[in-house]
Amino acid sequence: MSNSLWLISERLLTSLMGLFVVAAVARYLGPSDFGLLSYAFSLALLFAVAGQLGLDGLVIREIVNRPDDVPRVLGTVFVLKFAGHLLGATGLVIYAVSVSMHSTERVLLFWAAAFIPLAALSAFLGLWFHSRVQARYSAISSSVSTLLVSLGKLGLVWAGAGVVAFAAANVVQVLIAATLSLRFYRRQKGPPLSALRFSPTLAKTLLAESWLLFLGSIFALIYLKIDMIMLRWLAGPAEVGTYAVAAALSEAAYFVPAALVASVFPKLIEFAKSDQDLFDRRLQTVFDVLWLAGLGLVATMFLLGGPIIRLFFGAQYEASIPVLLVHVLSAPFYFMRIAFTRWTIIKGGATFFLITEGLGALTNVALNFLLIPHYGSLGAALATFVSYATASYLTLFFPVRTRPVFVMMSRSALMPWRAPKQFLNYVRRSAYA
């Protein structure tokens, strides 16, 4: 409980602080420069996928199961992940040098490339904290770095700094987080970094297990970041800025379903082993809650999204309002997708996870090519909505194994009509009891 509360508190703090600072920076820079900044770091996250390797969950498992072999596990994972992130950073630098672009944009990409390995170091140390159920140290590191750099960015706005200074601030943020994580790591008696060692045998074993998850993470990143990259080249930086503001508001509460599902995940594992009927009922309840939470976010943004954008971002982002109203329609499907991902873990359905993610990513890219040239950022938001609905819901109808999940999600979509009937049935049963 304490571990989860630290994680939720950290995400809530960083989300709220992030939205406030994003509003100030976006308003100051304007759609074009803010779009370039968003594009550069979206591209960095896409190149950073080379270091993800799908290892995070496996690493925590290995640390827990092999407490006497932690230096070998950590050393192996550090070499694999850092080498991958370094490769991604190198690829981004090569891209920045080889493609024709304005010098300011190229400098932004250089800063984004420096961001990749530093973020990897902070995330790597976080794996050790998570394995020991000490996520509060990662949360403190992230929160402190976010708070300090957020104040710094507000200072840059006050000082009238250029867009490159804000890119440098993002790099400083991950540097502070990595430094604090390292201090906590040493204070909690983590294995000395000098004692870590690389094992080719363990590396081969981990990579053999993680390749499906790695492909899935590539598709997931395409979902999240390909819109801004394609907007940059098909519509221009200003459209990226318009879309980035809408996406920031739409995705501000995305950590909530992850926390909800994480809290019930252990119980779902128990039910799956002991009572399949009870497992199905509880999973249906999870889908119901996630669907209603998604609808709640949609309703909130339809009511308050326009006033929030006008008040905090200014009239120059008026075009972000319709983009937000389309983009936020993805929320109910994204929320239920998180529960489906846990279902694939419990039922051994990694292949279904990969296939559905792949179809969703392909749908997203194809629709972006079709819609962005005609509708700009609004077209990108529509592509996101359709791709989420496709990957998280529609594709589950076709495989026989996932069709029961499709039925559960359909029942959740009918929740506003099911709830009165269920309440009446409950009253009727109570009357006869």
Image (cartoon, rainbow, N blue to C red):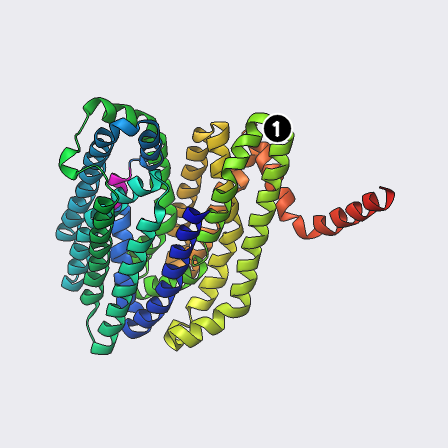
Q: Position of residue 68 (x, y in %)?
A: 27, 27
Q: Is residue 53 above or below residue 236?
A: above
| Type of the residue with mark 1 | Gln
Visible residue check, residue 191: yes
Residue at 65%, 30% (x, y): give it.
277
Say which of 222 and 419 sits in front. 419
Q: Would you say residue 390 is visible in this rendering?
A: no
Q: Quadrant of the C terminus?
A: top right
Question: Does the magenta run of residues contain 203?
Answer: no
Q: Residue furthest top?
A: 201
Local SS, label 1: helix
Q: Is residue 49 magenta?
A: yes
Q: Which residues are magenta?
A: 48-52
Q: Is residue 241 above or below residue 47?
A: below
Residue 142 rendering spot, x and y as whole percentages: 30, 55
Say which residue appears at 34% left-offset and 66% top-offset: 22
Circle 1 is placed at which residue position? 276
Q: Position of residue 23 (x, y in %)?
A: 36, 70
Q: Residues within 10 Å of mark 1 (few under 14, many from 20)?
A: few
* 95 and 257: which is toward the camera: 257
The x and y percentages for residue 102 are 16, 62
Q: Is residue 148 left or right of residue 244?
A: left
Q: From what the image shows, is residue 72 above or below residue 24?
A: above
The residue that appears at 55% across and 68% down in the rendered structure is 303
Counting the numbered discs, the total is: 1
